[in-house]
Amino acid sequence: MFTLAALVTLGAIISERSVALAAGCWRNTACTGPTSAAFPGAWDKYNYSPTSRTVSPESILSASGEFISDYTGPATLKLNGSQLIFDFGKEVAGIVTVSYGATGTGNLGLAFTEAKNWTGEWSDSSNGSFQPDGYLLASVTTTSEANYTMPDPRIRGGFRYLTLFSEAATEAFQINIQDITVEIAYQPSWSNLRAYQGYFSCSDDLLNRIWYSGAYTLQTNAIPPATGREFPILGGGWMNDQNLDLDSTGDTIYVDGSKRDRTVWPGDLGIAVPSILVSTGDWEGVANTLTVLYNDQQSSGELPFAGPGINIYGSDTYHMATLIGTYDYFLWTNDKTWLTTIYPKYKSAMEFITAKIDSTGMLSVTGTNDWGRLTQGGHNTEANMLLYKVLTSGSQIATWAGDSNSSSTWSSQAANLKAAVNANNYAASVGAFKDDDTDTTLYPEDANSMALVFGGALPQYVQSISQELTKNWISIGAVAPELPGNLVGFTQSFEIKAHMAARQATRGLELIRRAWGWYINNPYGTASTCIEGYLSDGSFGYRATTGYDNDYSYTSHAHGWGTGPTDALTSYIVGLTVTAPGGSQWSLSPQFGDLTHAEAGFTTPMGKFSASWSTIQGGYTVSWGAPGGTQGVLVLPASTMAPTLVVDGQSMALQQGAYNSTAQTVTISGASGSHTVNVTY
Ligand SMILES: *[C@@H]1O[C@H](CO)[C@@H](O)[C@H](O)[C@H]1NC(C)=O
Ligand SMILES: *[C@@H]1O[C@H](CO)[C@@H](O)[C@H](O)[C@H]1NC(C)=O
Ligand SMILES: *[C@@H]1O[C@H](CO)[C@@H](O)[C@H](O)[C@H]1NC(C)=O
Ligand SMILES: *[C@@H]1O[C@H](CO)[C@@H](O)[C@H](O)[C@H]1NC(C)=O
Ligand SMILES: *[C@@H]1O[C@H](CO)[C@@H](O)[C@H](O)[C@H]1NC(C)=O
């Protein structure tokens, strides 16, 4: 979905996007995605996305999970109940076809799982009744060659392992597996699944793998709209044939997770959208998803807690997440046609939520559904930090939409709210925000992290909050006090950004390595995606005792809300981000942490933006590239003395006030085009 105005300025990018090869897209989907990577380079080796829309397994394992051979090796199922496990080596998703020959009569069984823990005759669970999903059965008779293709409604949204097994009806039953293929359904409008419009690379290989696992997770969440989960389903097993876009808005929709729920959950988009914008660059899918949520708006102005398929309301926090996603999308694309269409709905949604601001100046939450935290309601701090972001970003949107009255109303509500939440909800004796203005025991990860990411905390509280958050750390990440015993992709994603927003880069990187490093190196996981959440004992049973009915296999292993490192590494560590619609203004504010080099790039309708830094003896070098007609600001690390700057080989005199001795930074303006600055301190 591009505006006409954007189309004109898009020029080369758009024409490249429209000449895609039809063969590579899903079924009848028009190929509107990009056809080649915007920043090809050595980092492409980290990209998990397949080179073709048809993929096959990498290796064959025994029923007990031992390596037997690479694929294709001899693969024979004999008699009753013999099993082979086919390992794709990473998360895949789609329609499976098995080519086989057989003697005798019986069934071929197929079962699926993301984690290695649930290989076997029962798939991991996704259908919502917290029992294993079961399996598919194909009836088999003697043949030299036949193909079994699973029915479309039984499309499997995410798996790494496929278990094939035999059920004999006659003696001497045997199935010879000749070939297995998966027709990939995700990122349906892209003919080249690896054509990322952004990239990242740094001196730590683990972080590179994690950045690309976030990007890949988001691709597996970008699904054809008619393949959502049926919920509740009738009759057993699973069904993924729910249309999530009844108005035919577009060809791609972002769901929360690949296996499940395969439903649009706006809160999850709060992490997913910024990571999509800096990595794959699929603006079209983001716009479609937001439009679908606005199509579901109630006459009260309320936006859904979950989109079509589940269609429920009553969540103030998820209502606000759609408003923040609206800001992120417009800031990135300057899609004015879209904003014009959406603005009346946006404004009505703003009226719905600001009507809940009471005499304290704070939001009093009455729509208490939320991401999974145990409690919500009243003057909850997390919800108020979200509203602070909604009001500050809303004030900017209103300006861009030519509605200066709303802009000033929302900006003064933001200032009042910030003063009130800091006065009422901050526990000075602890150095962190309480859960609300009456609570005295809980200092939540979500609220304290959002306070730093959204700028809702007073400056004098920032360092203490970042420090306090580390008290919840264990070897495999940060436990969320608001969901005891759980480590949550969503809240950890906010927390890493929070430390970086506090300019505690080393701390943020350390949490990425502990949590995401643990998962991507886990021999039982997908080794390619970001998990929804897990337990402090290192098992995959996220929310096992608080909503998921002790079903450890229900956890989603490819969940967009766990992709925070992708945005964090680009926006805070390389430090490159957009600050005015479409990127007409941008900022570059690198943080080195314990790294020696980092670089990243992304694309907006104005063109390609990139930046790179390397530390050197006595200082560092920063380079950047930005499209013509844009203007940047560079906030460069310094020490206790003003540094020496050489820009494009010319020494540069610092302007009055450029050096900030408190923040230990120096601020200079960044021109469009390609430039380099050497900083010595
Ligand atoms: C099975 O599928 C393969 C790949 O599409 C095809 O080449 C082959 O002819 C099919 N075999 C039968 C018996 O339909
Ligand atoms: C095959 O094994 C299943 C259990 O896995 C059993 O229910 C069934 O009766 C067996 N069939 C034959 C023909 O032995
Ligand atoms: C989910 O699948 C299981 C296994 O087939 C089945 O027992 C259960 O009834 C299904 N759930 C629903 C809601 O249909
Ligand atoms: C400006 O906004 C306020 C508060 O939303 C409203 O009461 C007032 O009518 C608006 N004025 C105009 C000129 O739209
Ligand atoms: C998965 O299974 C392995 C082997 O049984 C076990 O060690 C591990 O704890 C399980 N992992 C999770 C996360 O459930």
Image: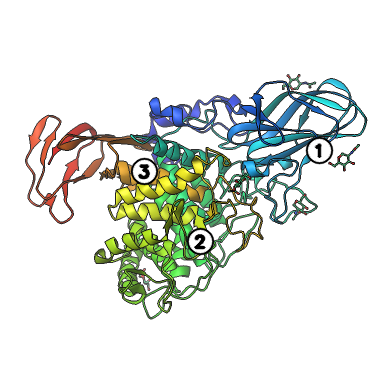
The span from disc 1 to disc 3 (Cα, nearest Å) is 44 Å
Counting residues from the start of the chain, the first of labels 3 and 2 encountered is: 2
User: In screen coordinates, is 373 left or right of 571?
Assistant: right
Q: Position of residue 670 (x, y in %)?
A: 20, 40
The answer to whether the residue bearing label 2 lies less than 8 angstroms from the nearest atom of ligand 3 is: no
Residue in view at x 29 percent, y 42 percent: 594
Residue in view at x 17 percent, y 47 percent: 667
Query: In the displayed structure, would residue 56 be above or below residue 220?
Result: above
The span from disc 1 to disc 2 (Cα, nearest Å) is 39 Å
User: In screen coordinates, is 467 left or right of 52?
Assistant: left
- Residue on which disc 3 sits: 569
Residue found at the very far top of the displayed protein:
144
State if disc 2 and disc 3 touch (CB < 8 Å): no
Counting residues from the start of the chain, the first of labels 1 and 3 encountered is: 1
Q: Position of residue 554 (x, y in %)?
A: 64, 52
State if disc 2 and disc 1 touch (CB < 8 Å): no
Residue in view at x 72 percent, y 53 percent: 131
Helix, strand or loop at label 3? It is helix
